[in-house]
Amino acid sequence: MSRISNVFKNKAEDEKVMTLFLTAGYPEQEATVDLILGFEKNGADIIELGMPFSDPLADGPTIQYSSNVAIENGTTLSSIFEMVKEVRKSSQIPLVLMGYINPILKYGMEAFFSDAAEAGVDGFILPDVPVEEADQVDAMCKKYDLDLIYLVAPNTTEERMKLIDEKSRGFIYCVSVTGVTGARDGDEVAKSVEKFIDRVNSNIHKNPVLVGFGIKNYEDATRISEKMDGFVVGSALITNIRENYPNAGWKENVVSFVKTLKYGNKADVPAS
């Protein structure tokens, strides 16, 4: 069983799995491993590690900004694999690489998936590789025992949801609103997403489902993920890093934000 599957198997019945998106190499390459380990100690169950790309078509301005900074910092696919190897020295938290197909093709398909598996990567989310065109990627992931995670959105048909459920491994990423990534008003997301989530639950039965796009705090996460297995936070986390970096104690402040995302202001939470 994969690390990702173990997270869902071992979670408490009423627990929501928290997945965090972090652009690899943002705000500086040296910080990525420390942030991942800090996030794990403060409630993160899965990490989506963004592979920075100059043309991230599914991402809004916040993650585009972090990608640009990471590229300027010299972040490459090879350096991301080194980050994963460093995390694996002390942690088994599932690591999912999220990004786009062009850099993978440039790296070389076979070499990329082989090196990813060797480094300790668990799976992939590739927004510009639709399920209908993913045979080669799917074959590589199966060859190297990696999960391939697809997205469903409000404009996804019931028939396509069922196909995605059949093809996905690990979990399914439920994009709560149509459009690019970015923190949104919680009421806006909640009102638009309720019927969609019911439709998702009617058509997806094989995989756990995490909901993302628009969650910016504990209240949003609790409300929007009520009928899901968990939630994903990306833009709000990148924004928090941007607001704190490079001030003194910025990592501690970001980690504290993560703890609040998972537990709210409850007193009985694990010590970081």
Image: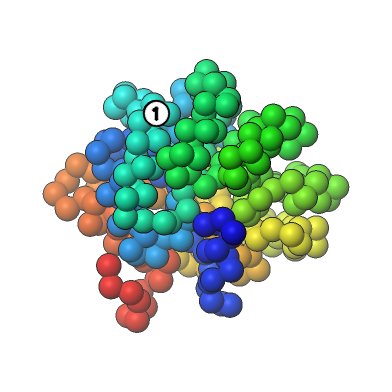
Q: Is residue 178 above or below residue 211?
A: above
Q: Position of residue 85 (x, y in %)?
A: 36, 42
Which quadrant of the structure image shows residue 138? top right
* The furthest residue to the right: 159
Q: Position of residue 245 (x, y in %)?
A: 23, 43
Q: Residues within 10 Å of mark 1 (few under 14, many from 20)?
A: few
Which of the image's four quarters has the N terminus? bottom right
* The furthest residue to the left: 248
Count of picture labels: 1
Residue carrying label 1: 78
Drawn side of residue 8 relative to residue 18, left or right: right
Q: Residue at x 40, y 35 (%)?
A: 81
Q: Position of residue 18 (x, y in %)?
A: 48, 61
Q: Residue at x 33, y 74 (%)?
A: 270
Q: Residue at x 80, y 46 (%)?
A: 163
The amino acid marked with disc number 1 is Ser
Q: Is residue 263 above or below residue 246?
A: below
- Label 1 residue SS: helix
Q: Is residue 271 above or below residue 123?
A: below
Drawn side of residue 134 relative to residue 181, left or right: right
* The furthest residue to the bottom: 268
Q: Residue at x 53, y 51 (%)?
A: 214
Which of the image's four quarters has the C terminus? bottom left
**Visible residue check, residue 64:** no
Judging from the image, the colouring scheme is rainbow
Which quadrant of the structure image shows residue 155? top right
**Which one is nearer the viewer's eye here, 94 or 119?**
119
**Visible residue check, residue 109:** yes
Q: Position of residue 4 (x, y in %)?
A: 55, 56
